[in-house]
């Protein structure tokens, strides 16, 4: 599922645009497979798709999906962090992906998020998932921990995107097939 582009496109795209150009085609393939396979188990579709990606694509994909959801607001950051953490394979894949890119700052932040969510007995599986977006309104103590983490996330994610973009630029074959 390597993205195809010309050398000129590859060289002229700014960092963040290159990052997105490598992510968006993967997302389209993923969504089309989910729609096609409605009768199949969703986790099987995800695993089959994920196995077809290179290590770099996996790391990019899982982080970007999380980022796209978690970056919208503090409430969304809280809910999506809990949701991803309730799926140990995905949470672990995101941490492994950040290690793959050498992004220690975001990895440490995810570990801080994990500590807070565990302290407040957030579920470790989707079967027990009862987290709501209103939880922060109902628990001021939890809000006091999540709020600075969200601020840190907002700052750190910018650097993460830059790190991933530079990795894509320097490891083109893992993401892009050049067609001249």
Image (tube, grey):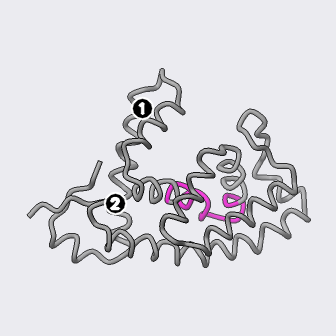
Residue 68 belongs to magenta span: yes
Q: Dot 2: few (<14), some (14–19), or many (≥20) neighbours within 10 Å?
A: many
Between marks 1 and 2 in the image, the one whose residue lies nearer the viewer = 2
CB under 8 Å between discs 1 and 2: no
The picture quadrant where one finds residue 157 is bottom right
Range of the magenta residues?
Answer: 64-77
Say which residue appears at 26% left-offset and 60% top-offset: 176
Q: Dot 1: few (<14), some (14–19), or many (≥20) neighbours within 10 Å?
A: few
User: Which mark is on residue 22?
Assistant: 2
Where residue 22 sits: x, y (%)?
A: 34, 60
Say which residue appears at 62% left-offset and 67% top-offset: 107
Along the line of sight, which residue is nearer the eye, 179 or 55? Answer: 55
Residue 15 belongs to magenta span: no
User: Which mark is on residue 153?
Assistant: none
Chief secondary structure of the magenta portion: helix
Where residue 80 sits: x, y (%)?
A: 66, 53
Q: Residue furthest top?
A: 39
For residue 12, side relative to residue 153 (left or right): left
Q: Residue furthest left?
A: 180
For residue 132, side relative to residue 90 (left or right): right
For residue 118, side relative to residue 96 (left or right): right
User: Which mark is on residue 35?
Assistant: 1
The picture quadrant where one finds residue 171 is bottom left
Along the line of sight, which residue is nearer the eye, 124 or 78? Answer: 124
Q: Is 127 rendered above or below residue 103?
A: above
């Amino acid at each position: 599922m390597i993205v195809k582009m010309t050398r000129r496109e590859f060289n002229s795209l700014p960092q963040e645009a290159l990052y997105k150009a490598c992510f968006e085609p993967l997302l389209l393939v993923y969504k089309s497979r989910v729609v096609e396979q409605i009768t199949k188990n969703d986790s099987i579709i995800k695993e089959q798709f994920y196995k077809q990606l290179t290590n770099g694509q996996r790391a990019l994909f899982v982080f970007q999906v999380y980022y796209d959801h978690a970056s919208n607001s503090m409430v969304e950051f809280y809910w999506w962090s809990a949701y991803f953490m309730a799926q140990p394979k995905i949470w672990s894949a995101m941490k492994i992906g950040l290690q793959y890119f050498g992004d220690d700052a975001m990895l440490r932040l995810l570990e801080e998020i994990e500590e807070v969510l565990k302290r407040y007995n957030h579920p470790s599986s989707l079967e027990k998932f009862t987290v709501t977006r209103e939880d922060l309104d109902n628990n001021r103590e939890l809000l006091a921990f999540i709020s600075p983490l969200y601020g840190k996330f907002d700052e750190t994610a910018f650097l993460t995107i830059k790190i991933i973009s530079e990795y894509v630029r320097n490891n083109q074959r893992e993401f892009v097939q050049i067609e001249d």
